[in-house]
């Protein structure tokens, strides 16, 4: 895959960062190596934090969060909210991808 200047090309779509003070950072993050570098840095920080100060790491994940409306409340710790949210996002993506796939297959069958 070729990249020219600060634009990133993905499946024929060219994305160019907007101008301004943060344009160099956005241009860097649009590249695969820039995004991978940020991900690796985040993993290293998380591993260090989890292994150096376990009490602070565990207290962060067990922070109680609640949403209450009137007399009703949903309450869980941060780990539970994040796990539930990520599972919801995963199944939403699976649903959308399968719907698109079935639409493509149905369209190909109609054309054949």
Image: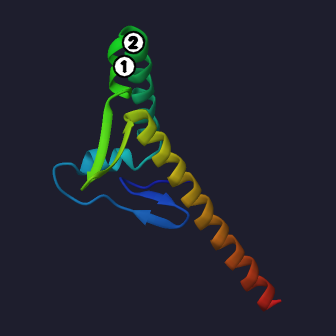
Position of residue 25 measured from the top left corner of the image (x, y, whole percent): 28, 44
Quick one: label 1, few (<14), some, or many (20+) residues within 10 Å?
some
- The quarter holding residue 64 reads top left
Quick one: label 2, few (<14), some, or many (20+) residues within 10 Å?
few
Q: Is residue 48 left or right of residue 21?
A: right
Position of residue 112 measured from the top left corner of the image (x, y, whole percent): 83, 89
- The quarter holding residue 105 reads bottom right
Res. 47 mark? none
| The one of 6 and 25 positioned closer to us in this rendering | 25
| The one of 54 and 44 positioned closer to us in this rendering | 54
| The one of 41 and 84 positioned closer to us in this rendering | 84
- The quarter holding residue 75 reads top left
Residue located 24% across and 51% down the image: 23
The secondary structure type at the circle numbered 1 is helix
Whole-angstrom CA distance, mark 2 to mark 1, is 5 Å
Which residue is disc 2 drawn over? Answer: 54
User: Outermost residue toward the bottom?
Assistant: 111
Q: How many marks?
A: 2
11 w.r.t. 2: above or below: below
Which residue is disc 1 drawn over? Answer: 57
Residue located 68% across and 79% down the image: 103
Residue located 36% across and 19% down the image: 57
Position of residue 4 measured from the top left corner of the image (x, y, whole percent): 42, 55
| The one of 99 and 104 positioned closer to us in this rendering | 99
64 w.r.t. 45: above or below: below
**Are circles 2 and 1 on residues that touch, CB within 8 Å?**
yes
Residue located 41% across and 40% down the image: 34
User: Outermost residue toward the right?
Assistant: 112
The secondary structure type at the circle numbered 2 is helix
Q: Is residue 60 left or right of residue 106?
A: left
């Amino acid at each position: 895959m070729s990249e020219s200047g600060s634009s990133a090309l993905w499946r024929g779509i060219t994305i160019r960062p907007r101008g301004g003070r943060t344009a160099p950072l956005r241009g860097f993050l649009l590249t695969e190596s820039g995004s991978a570098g940020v991900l690796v840095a985040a993993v290293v920080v998380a591993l260090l934090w989890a292994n150096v100060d376990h009490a602070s790491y565990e207290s962060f994940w067990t922070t109680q969060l609640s949403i209450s409306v009137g007399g009703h409340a949903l309450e869980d710790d941060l780990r539970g909210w994040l796990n539930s949210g990520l599972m919801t996002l995963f199944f939403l993506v699976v649903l959308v991808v399968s719907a698109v796939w079935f639409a493509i297959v149905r369209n190909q069958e109609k054309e054949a």
